[in-house]
Amino acid sequence: MQQHFILHKPYGYLSQLINNQNKRKNKRLLGELFDFPEGTMAIGRLDENSEGLLFLTTDGKVSETIRSAKVEKEYYAQVDGLITTEAINKLQKGVEISVNGTKYVTKSCSAKNIENVSVFPFENRKVRDARHGPTSWVSITLTEGKFRQVRKMTAAVGFPTLRLVRVRIGSVLLSLKTGNTKKVDSFFN
């Protein structure tokens, strides 16, 4: 029987359950947060410095469907500086980033300035001291998922990402507290 899980991945964890690398012996892994059954895999990834909604499953077919362009993924990025309307417009139209050393123009996407991030249950973690200047939040919704894409996109428009939280996959919103896991029958009802 296939099993599915929703997790609020904390900052500082790798999106894997077991350590199969010699270089990263002291890294924190998702298996420390919950006793997942053998064969469980993360669907898509959030890098070690990113946090938020993550699906895990024992069913590879479900993984393929969710990673496809049919399912939107929404991210909240806290960026360095007060993001401008011009930068938002550029993000919406697509920007040039590097993917595996090759220039790539991102697909058009939804992007908007976010005033209130308290609608989601993520930690009010300070990323830097206020004397380093203001920060702002932007929502970016993608149907693709290149390596570190959101971080590269915000940097390309002059507003590097300081903090990144995935808040939605398809119709599922981030609702768990940081580090919590919930077993579900399916991801989308």
Image (cartoon, rainbow, N blue to C red):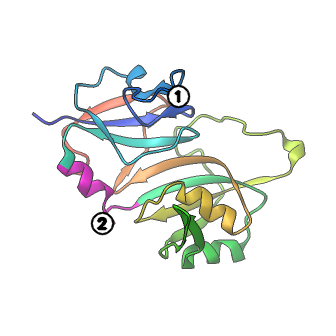
Which label is found at residue 121?
Answer: none
The residues colored magenta run 61-72
Name the one closer to the observer, 46 or 127: 46
Residue most extreme to the left: 1
Q: Is residue 64 left or right of residue 177?
A: left
Q: Amino acid at mark 2?
A: Lys
Residue 124 relative to residue 21: left or right: right
> Which of label 2 and label 1 is nearer to you?
1
Q: Residue at x 24, y 57 (%)?
A: 65
Residue 14: x and y in percent read: 48, 34
Please determine whether, in this image, residue 91 is positioned above or below residue 53: below
Q: Which residue sits at x=65%, y=62%?
A: 154
Numbered disc 1: secondary structure: loop
The amino acid pointed to by label 1 is Lys
Residue 82, by quadrant, is bottom right
The residue depicted at 63 percent of the width and 77 percent of the height is 89
Q: Secondary structure at mark 2?
A: loop
For the point 61% across and 53% down, which residue is it? 77
Q: Which residue is mark 2?
A: 70
Q: Quadrant of residue 83?
A: bottom right
Q: Position of residue 183 (x, y in %)?
A: 26, 31
User: Which callout, 2 or 1, points at the residue further toward the start of the chain?
Assistant: 1
Q: Which residue is mark 1?
A: 23
Q: Position of residue 171 (x, y in %)?
A: 34, 55
Q: Position of residue 19 (x, y in %)?
A: 41, 26
Does 74 appear above or below 127?
below
* Left or right for 183, reference 77: left
Of 93 and 97, nearer the camera is 97
